[in-house]
Amino acid sequence: MASFDSINYSLRPSKSVQRGIVFHGLKALSDAMALQNSLYIGFGSIWFTDFVMAHKALEIDEMISIEANDVGFRRAEFNKVYRSISVVEGRSEDKLPELLNQGEYQARPWIVWLDYDGALDEEKVEEMRWLLLNAPPNSIVLFTFSATQNAYGKPAQRPGRVADILGPVVPDELSREDCNQENLPQTLASLTMDFLSSVVADNARPGGFIRSFKIPYFDSVGMVTVGGVLPALGTAPAARAVIADHKWQGIVDEMIQAPPMTLKEVATLQAELPCLEDLTRARVQELGFDLLEHQIRSFQRYYKYLPNFAEIVS
Amino acid sequence: MIPGDKSKASANPTKAFFVRMITRDITLEDCIFDLIDNSIDGAWELAGGRPMSLADDTDLSAYKISIEIKPDRFSIHDNCGGISLDDAANYAFTFGRKDDAETENFSIGVYGIGMKRAVFKIGSKIGIKSTFTDNGGLMSFRVPVDVNAWLAAGDGNWDFDIEGADNLAAPGVQIDVTDLNEAAAQSFESPRFIQDLRRAIARDYALHLHRGLTIEVEGKSINGWAIELRQGGEFSPMRASFEENIEGEKVYVEVLAGMEAIPPEDSDPDGDWDEDQNRSGWYVVCNGRIVLAADKTTLTGWGTESWPIWHPQYTGFMGLIIFSSRRADLLPLTTTKRSVDATSQLYRRYRPNMREPSKAWIAYTNARRQRERDEVVGQEQEAKSVPIYEVAAQPAVVLPQVATKKRVPEANVLYSVPKPRLLKLATAMGNIRMPYKEVGLQSFEYAYADLVGED
């Protein structure tokens, strides 16, 4: 199913957190690397949520949305939120090389976010490889894909399937446990990051690859976002300094599982924040309701990125 | 008339030759292996320094080699006895082996170039520290090498300074390299490089790891390959031992060969065939180190006179030829220890011993194609994997005598489909990793049962 036929994903809380972390990080990198003249490329679908953030937060004007579906293409053209967005019809594996061949796009950094609908597979990995080796200097690449376990075969087949997709970076001892429902998003995030680093290092791309985003999150299914910077030689130290800063949030160790909450719950908990100590479950219960420990942790860490919306029930 | 000052052609070596030229002839991985070899030579000497035959049960479990690989530094340290001060002053840092250098018993290192070439390949700020036992006590020194300063000092003085140092935790060597060369730094940033290094160590040092040696990369111990041949039913691997006398020294040779895995279903590789995963072929081992692995080239005979070139049909065959000698220079290994010296008389003399089991396997795989698959595989499955150390002596490989039978004529079906669709069908059939051929056969059976019904 194409993404425009499913729920408006701007409404999913963990997705909002993921998007918030990504654009917060991109803003810091953009400031350090002076990327305002970048070209933003993504799959805008009919919602263009990330395009709005790219324009507002990163001050990027020129943006390209790739849409493979012909109905989706017409709807995207109809719904695009800024006149500086170009919607191109076709598959990204064809369209990205075409964009690179256009002189005006060759000399500018790209911020590319390929937010795939489905699971990681050989085609996506090939597309990642192409981007890593061909994106202009100072580009930033991000990839999001599903980590739902059934898309990678039955439990006994999963370690082998992951190795089929990502190749030699996958350790021979990858276990079934590494690939179970709970661990698969982190496993895929780490190994895909290893794959990205290896492609750049093995092909001696000048400037290298700076691992910047590793975000496993859960919104009814496990999802993973990974990405990094492909700096020009001279810009690499500035970009590395941004990622090395203790404030950098792009590398997430614990799966983000932002709980769906009512406005009343959000308002009550938000009134306790920010605070230096960890919010406890006992405190939440004192406030009159309840949440699981990991939900409280996610809320405290990421409440600034949760969506601001309310469903009107008549 | 030749003027007096032109009567000699200068043939002095230059430092740059050793730093920039000979480092091009070896991979980064093999450089790291050279350093591991030095550590192992120390351990082997301490453990008794016997011939590295399969039957030998030397215990190496007291010895450990740890390797750390970071984007900005490399280090290797061991507890394998260390380099003595005398050896450091007179031999270990010499470029090339001196004639009067004492022969290390059954060592892997032989040419006197490995350590220098390895560290030069990796980076330009090098620290080599050794702790060794001297008159019952411990003594230590370090040799710092700043390659750029050493080069800038000209070709007049080649020596490195030796300085006093604190003791390491146990007698052994620690080598640290910083200021990495660009290619090394890039490789060390690659998780793929590190995984492949682990795999290569697991394979090439399998015989040492089997004896309890610990090799760690990034804090993780490596399990050696279990090298096994199938035995049972009508299958029996060969295992034959020989002794040679070269220049007054004994050279021990052992040849093992047989079925390592059940051969593929047919001779045509599928789209999902992965030659890299294929363990079949010949292995050459010199003083315990696998220097050539899963070889399917002319180097081990395939495609030479009366010996067909390798074909996937021969998959399942494994042969090992194991050389050991107190003097490693008598063995057919190259300076990079990644191949064999095909001109070596010793090696050429034993090629016929490799040809016979290879040809027996080729004949067997030709014959088995004419038989009903289930019958052949049933026979092959009777043979169980046995570690090579447990294979009994047997002068020639024993394989079933396969009589050709008349079969129902067969038709081969060949077609291509988009891979994502095939994966979806394989998933629906219960195994996303089902071989393509199996997906095709199951699809045929499904359609046959649906459209034709019973035979």
Image (spheres, coloured by chain):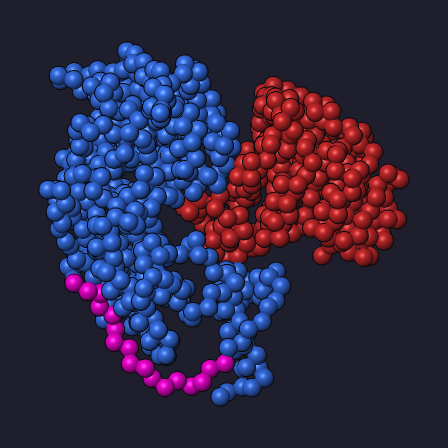
Chain colours: A red, B blue
Q: Tell me if residue A114 can be seen.
A: yes
How many labels were placed on the picture? Answer: 0
Residue A167 versus residue B335: which sits nearer the camera?
A: B335
In percent of the image, x 30 and y 46: which residue is there? B341
Q: Position of residue B391 (x, y in %)?
A: 19, 57
Q: Tell me if residue B257 can be seen.
A: no
Specify the quadrant that holds the N terminus of chain B: top left
In percent of the image, x 49 and y 69: which residue is there? B438
Residue B21 versus residue B417: which sits nearer the camera?
A: B21
Instruction: Please tell me in which quadrant of the rendered image residue B65 appears.
Output: top left
Instruction: Please tell me in which quadrant of the rendered image residue A249 appears.
Output: top right
Instruction: Please tell me in which quadrant of the rendered image residue B17 appears.
Output: top left
Q: Main secondary structure of the magenta part?
A: loop
Membership of A135 in magenta stretch: no
Is B34 placed above or below A179 here? above
Membership of B409 in magenta stretch: yes
Relative to B353, B268 lies left or right: right
Q: Position of residue B11 (x, y in %)?
A: 35, 26
Extreme residue toward the top, this view: B164
Extreme residue toward the front, this view: B1
Relative to A199, B155 lies left or right: left
Is A83 placed above or below B394 here? above
Residue B244 versus residue A153: which sits nearer the camera?
A: B244
Extreme residue toward the left, this view: B248
In percent of the image, x 36 and y 21: which residue is there? B3
Q: Position of residue B216 (x, y in %)?
A: 34, 34
Magenta residue span: B395-411
In percent of the image, x 86 and y 38: which residue is there? A84
Q: Position of residue B63 (x, y in %)?
A: 24, 32
